[in-house]
Amino acid sequence: LDRRPEDLPGLQVAAAVGQGRLMERYFREFARSGRVAGQVLLTRDILANRAQYLHAR
């Protein structure tokens, strides 16, 4: 991309691509030290429910 998208679909596509590239970078850097990286999706509902929040923590 030569500039930041301005429309919502364009922003969503860019975010999805960027997220994948970011995670790839994390995986690679953690692997260099023999560690495994992961990703967790936390939603507002999980954070609002104490039991789920504590489990996620």
Image: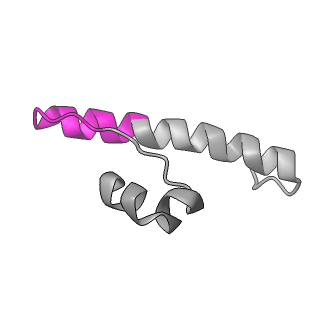
Question: Which range of residues does the magenta coloring cover?
Answer: 24-37
Q: Nearer the viewer, residue 7 or 39?
A: 39
* Residue 10 lies in the magenta-colored region: no
Q: In the visual, does 29 lie left or right of 17?
A: left
Residue 38 visible in the displayed image? yes
Question: Looking at the rendering, which quadrant does residue 3 occupy?
Answer: bottom right
Membership of 25 in magenta stretch: yes
- Compared across the picture, whether 44 is left or right of 1 comes to left
Residue 54 in which image quadrant: bottom left
Determine the residue positioned at 50% across, 57% down.
46
Q: Position of residue 5 (x, y in %)?
A: 81, 52
- For the view shown, which residue lies furthest in the right direction? 7
Overall secondary structure of the magenta stretch? helix
Q: Quadrant of the N terminus?
A: top right
Picture coordinates of residue 32, whole percent (x, y): 15, 34
Q: Is residue 50 above or below residue 8?
A: below
Residue at 24% x, 40% y: name it: 29
Q: Residue furthest left?
A: 34
Q: Quadrant of the C terminus?
A: bottom left
32 is higher (above) or lower (below) than 54: above
- The residue that appears at 21% across and 33% down in the rendered structure is 36
